[in-house]
Amino acid sequence: MGSITTTSHKSPRFVFSETQKRKVHHLFNVLDIDRNGQLQPSDFVNVGKKIVKQLGLNEDSRSARLILLKSHRLFVQLLADLHNPELTLTLWDWIAFFRDQIEAEDEGILNHYIHRTSRHVFDLFDMNKDKLISREEYANMLTIYNISHKMAIQGFEELDNNSDDYISADEMVEGLSNFFKSEDSEAKGNLIFGEWR
């Protein structure tokens, strides 16, 4: 008589919660500048162009070209992270990536994504390059992503942990970590990209 074998399925270390899913879905919508339901190079390049315009840079200047290159590079790196050979990302691809990373045994890929995105966001927002983001810099940048001034200020205040009226690089990383990892709907950093609820 044969023996019965059972396969045990290991439960994930963390479960991708509905709160996390809603935040990630919201961020997809924020990044989908043309609102066509897909993330494409043009979404990221158009943000770069808006930044160039807001800073009053000549489109042919080295500074402007660098901003456009960084914007495009962020999208290319995202495709690499998702192992996606296509030039578009669907909402399903996006949510599945974050679900898989949050439920993974190793947080390495997610942490790398958070730190790289934090550096990119910080570099774009820090318009005067003083290694701090002021309230005005933060609000001005979020208007590019169609986030209201009121919501931008709320997000800024959540990120400014030490209440010095500036966001440091460390505060940005902490806020992004909370945004992606925390299941707490009131976690500091949840409003980093505006109202998601």
Image (tube, rainbow, N blue to C red):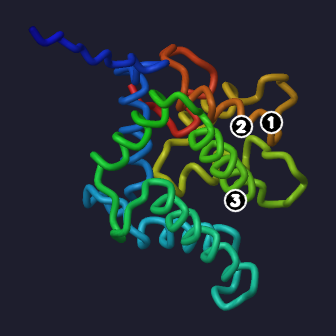
Outermost residue to the left = 1
What distance separates the C-alpha of mark 3 from that of mark 1? 16 Å
Q: Secondary structure at mark 1?
A: helix
Residue 50 or 62: which is nearer the viewer?
62
Do the residues under discs 1 and 2 have CB atoms within 8 angstroms? yes
| Residue tagged 3 | 124
Q: Secondary structure at mark 3?
A: helix
Residue at screen point 64% across, 67% down: 54
**Badge 2: residue crowd in 10 Å (few <14, some 14–19, many ≥20):** many
Residue 132 in the image: state x and y as whole percent. 85, 46
* Residue at image location 44% in from the left, 43% down from the top: 27
First in residue order: circle 2 vs circle 3: 3
Q: Mark 3: few, some, or many residues within 10 Å (few <14, many ≥20)?
A: many
Q: Residue furthest front?
A: 1
Give the CA separation, mark 1 to mark 2. 5 Å
In this image, 44 relative to 70: left or right? left
Identify the residue at image location x=83%, y=24%.
Answer: 163
Q: Quadrant of residue 173?
A: top right
| Badge 3 vs badge 1, beta-carbon distance below 8 Å | no
Reading the image, the residue beneath label 2 is 173
- Up/down of 73 relative to 90, above or below: below
Q: Position of residue 179 (x, y in %)?
A: 55, 30
Q: Which residue is the extreme one toward the bottom?
A: 60
| Residue type at tag 3 | Leu
| Quadrant in which the C terminus appears | top left
Q: Which residue is mark 1?
A: 170
Toward which corner of the image does residue 120 lie, by quadrant?
Answer: bottom right
Residue at (42, 72) in percent of width and height: 42
